[in-house]
Image (cartoon, rainbow, N blue to C red):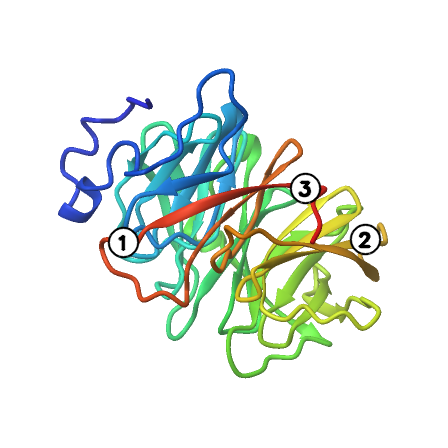
Amino acid sequence: MLTRRTSALALATTLAATLVGTAPGAAVAKPDEPFPTVMSLPDGWQPEGIAIGSNKRAWFGSRADGSIYELDLKTGEGEVVSKGPGTPSVGLKVDRRGRLFVAGGPAGNARVVDTETGDVLATYQLTTGASFVNDVLLYRKAAWFTDSQRAQLYKLPLGEAGALPDPSEVETLPLTGAWAQVAGFNANGISRTPNHQALLVVNSAASTLYRVDPETGTATVVDLGGTSLTNGDGLLVKGTRLFVVQNVLNRVAVLKLDPDGTAGTLERTISSPHFDVPTTVGRLGSRLYLPNARFSTPPTPTTPYTVVQVPANAED
């Protein structure tokens, strides 16, 4: 059982307090057993993002109140490690310094959380007005965030030794070129090309994958040979393969990309009977982990939520 930060969590609200410790019904593996296939998150958690770091630890933000839950992927045990601000935590990424970069959804902001202490190291108001800061990527000494309601990305440049920027240094990069802003949720999952030269952004409403120049914001459509990324959500690049979570379709599309990310082909799809509207994906070795957001299930304080493990080489 994880035991850090118990005193820091003593002042958590009633919701967060009920979530401390191993989630009810969580799968717990014995030392000689394989990693659990399905693991429970706290009831009422409403997960969306996932970040996987060292020591087989993963973190999940809550759309209910923005708290952060840490899970041991080998044992299935976990605990709340950071009390939320009362607004959602959506996309997550963790760096080598143990800092969690958190997309704030409709709050239009981003937070940086220390995974060891649970302290909020910095908060950045990326935009005002209608917005949904959705996903995050750590790329080229910066944290990049998508906005599902605005045709723009946000960049938090990191200084020497990963120093966090001053709020005045936050940059907004308009999406131009072939980018099509349509009705509904637009820019969602974000990753980078296999050769690390450009960004990849999926437009959920347009079912389209774009390659974005990180200097100019110019977007070009990635030629997928007619493959439509309907309900495209979280992205993960491993080598020349791109994993695209298609949330409501309960599957992951696996595409083989050119090194520069201008074209690709659909190789296969991955599904699981345990999927229930997964939103994004993290990787640990040969395993993929996906949190079930359960968007089609009305959320209540007692609604159960899970994380599902599937082999990265699986197929339907």
Residue 312, numbered circle:
3
**To which residue does mark 2 refer?**
256
Disc 2 or disc 3, which is closer to the eye? 3
Q: Earlier in the sequence, mark 1 or mark 2?
A: 1
**Where on the picture, by quarter, is residue 253?**
bottom right
Amino acid type of the residue that numbered disc 2 sits on in the rendered structure: Lys
Residue 76, numbered circle:
none
Labels 3 and 1 touching (C-beta < 8 A): no
Residue 65, numbered circle:
1
Q: CA distance from mark 2 to mark 3?
A: 14 Å
Q: Look at the numbered disc 1 and give the secondary structure of its residue.
A: loop
* Residue 147 on image: x %, y %: 51, 66
With 110 as the anchor, is 236 left or right in this view?
Answer: right
Q: Is residue 19 above or below residue 104?
A: above
The residue that appears at 81% across and 54% down in the rendered structure is 257
Q: Earlier in the sequence, mark 3 or mark 1?
A: 1
* Residue 237 on image: x %, y %: 70, 47
